[in-house]
Image: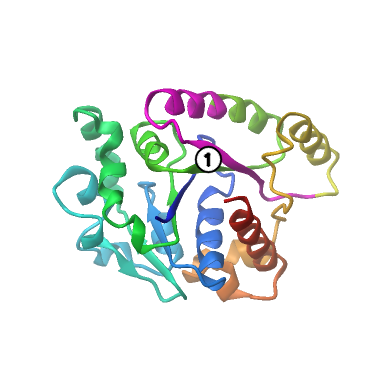
Amino acid sequence: MGKIISFANQKGGVGKTTSAINIAAALGILGYKVLLIDLDPQGNATSGVGIAKKNLKATVFDVLTTDASASSVILKTPFENLWLIPTHTTLAKAELLLGETEAGEFVLKKKLEEISDQFDYIIIDCPPSLGMLTVNAATASDGIIIPMQCEFFALEGLSQLMFTVSRIKAHYNKALNVTGILITMHNNRLILSAQVLNELRKHYADKLFETTISRNVKVSEAPGFGLPVYYHGKHSKGAVEYLNVAKELVERI
């Protein structure tokens, strides 16, 4: 059975989608079969792997709200060992529909059961909120990766997210754990970054990925070309860092 990992943080702009795309692509480069699920109505993970949203005939919205199977909406991306369940802005409607559905928290989990043995890893990019879409992802997952920046507001958000994870674990998914906390857009020359990182090491030392993701031009440019950073600049610092995080993830799991 493939391992299901959600990338979640209710705070936007923390590199969540960027990390989901690049770690999924890096796992594919390492030889693993990977399915990336875009569960964010903004659809950035979809466009970030070169899939045009305007041409989509079916998306994860159909999986969550109709009888459509997960396998019926999977697309092969142009990248090695990487497949996608895409999304569109219509996914925003799913929050309300899932809330009105009996056992709505388990819809995604049930749909993924039929395909989880076809992939080594299923990576879910969650929206920047703690609503029904994120709850569905967490209920279906073996673990959660929390991307975050070295800022004090991010520390406050982390506490809230940890509480939410504990609630989901208690009510919907006893096997759920925080797989890791990933520092993104890191600048080791800033005193604030060092202070926040020290706080994280005090309280979450066992959860922190050893590799941090630096601010990197290639990482910022790659989505504009519909490419994971490895395919935009394989020798760039960002590509190397995300590959190292993927290796750490494999070791942790």
Residue 106 in the figure: left or right of residue 129: left
Q: Splitting the image into 4 quarters, where does residue 57 fall?
A: bottom left
Look at the image and tell me whether residue 202 can be seen. yes
In percent of width and height, residue 52 lies at 33, 67
In percent of width and height, residue 111 lies at 25, 48
Q: Is residue 98 magenta?
A: no
Q: Splitting the image into 4 quarters, where does residue 148 fall?
A: top right
Judge the density around disc 1: few (<14), some (14-19), many (≥20) Cα neighbours within 10 Å.
few
Q: What's the residue at 29%, 63% (across, down)? A: 74
| Above or below 109: residue 200 | above
Residues in magenta, as a range:
161-187
Disc 1 secondary structure class: loop
Residue 34 in the figure: left or right of residue 229: left
Q: Is residue 178 magenta?
A: yes
Tell which of 83 and 157 is nearer to you.
Answer: 83
Type of the residue with mark 1: Gly
| Scheme by which the image is coloured | rainbow
Tell which of 78 and 175 is nearer to you.
Answer: 175
In percent of width and height, residue 173 lies at 40, 32
Q: Residue farthest to the front?
A: 1
Residue under pointer 1: 12
Q: What's the residue at 64%, 65% (across, down)? A: 243
| Above or below 80: residue 151 | above
Tell which of 26 and 229 is nearer to you.
Answer: 26
Quadrant where the N terminus sits is: bottom left
Tell which of 167 and 133 is nearer to you.
Answer: 167
In percent of width and height, residue 164 lies at 49, 26
Look at the image and tell me whether residue 123 can be seen. no
| Above or below 184: residue 31 | below
Residue 173 in the figure: left or right of residue 179: left
